[in-house]
Amino acid sequence: MRRKSIPVLVGFVLIAMSAAMAAADPGPTGQVSFGQVSIEPAYDDVTGQLIYLLTPDKVAQPSKANPIATAPLYLPVYPTNSTVSPLNCLPTNCDHVQVLPPGLVASLGLQSVYPTGTISTKYGSLTGGLVKGHDHLVGVAKTGGDFNVAWHVYLVLFTTKGAGDGAINQPLRTLSDVNAAIARGDAVGPLDSGIVFNCSITSEATYLRGH
């Protein structure tokens, strides 16, 4: 009986270790690159499924695409005290939207949600409305989303109501989530960032090649 219990015990230990490792895995986050492209995680804005976006480094910014040939890309931006994790991008691992323009935050009366401060990143010191990070929501053609190669970026920010009622701790990973949060008054947007850029959907394997 004692000999038989050893494999069972080992099995339980391995299961426990696997569960602990899965719990410790934060999921894909951050912008990686190889060659002359960068890749970052995103979400299908219809299904909420994780996908990946590939952006060529040496292309015109902003994109010169005709407005009718663009699709919206939504960026829910989470305050520093949000518990949502993982996020597609953090201020320390992506080169965009590391802070919010203080003027934008003030115009919306969101200084208590995104207080102005200065952070240090590998991209330099940045001052603005402090954020925990953001996600990317894009349309995917095969699931019925609004897809194009040129993407027009729209911000989605949480309101003081959203901060007070805990909505900042609920991930917005589909367009339905975004619209519902805006309808409840927990978020405001979509806010036109004025940014239009080109990217395409790529595979997880491509993301894993980056560094």
Image: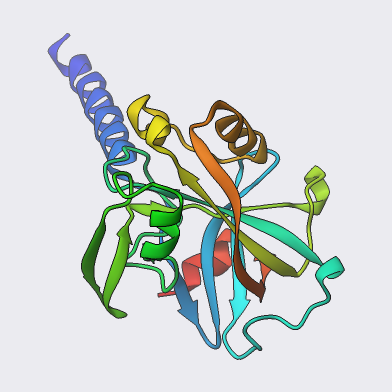
Residue 54 falls left or right of residue 119: right
Which of 57 and 196 lies nearest the eye of the viewer?
A: 196
Where does the image place residue 54, in percent across and percent down from the top left? Answer: 61, 71
Up the image or down, 36 lies above or below 210; here it is below
Residue 190 falls left or right of residue 88: right
Up the image or down, 97 lies above or below 164; here it is below
Q: Quadrant of the C terminus?
A: bottom left
Query: Residue lying farthest top?
Result: 1
Quarter of the rendering containing residue 19? top left
Which of 107 and 16 lies nearest the eye of the viewer?
A: 107
Whether residue 100 is visible here, answered yes or no, is no
Q: How is the image coloured?
A: rainbow
Residue 41 falls left or right of residue 78: right
Q: Quadrant of the N terminus?
A: top left
Q: How many marks?
A: 0
Q: Name the residue: 76% across, 61% down.
A: 71
Q: Name the residue: 86% across, 67% down.
A: 68
Whether residue 111 is visible here, answered yes or no, is yes
Q: Name the residue: 57% across, 86% down.
A: 57
Where does the image place residue 103, in percent across and percent down from the top left? Answer: 41, 64
Where does the image place residue 199, in percent across and percent down from the top left? Answer: 67, 72
Which of 85 and 134 lies nearest the eye of the viewer?
A: 134
Which of 168 and 87 lies nearest the eye of the viewer?
A: 168
Q: Name the residue: 51% across, 64% down.
A: 40
Quarter of the rendering containing residue 184? top right
Where does the image place residue 128, in percent across and percent down from the top left? Answer: 31, 65
Query: Residue lying farthest left?
Result: 2
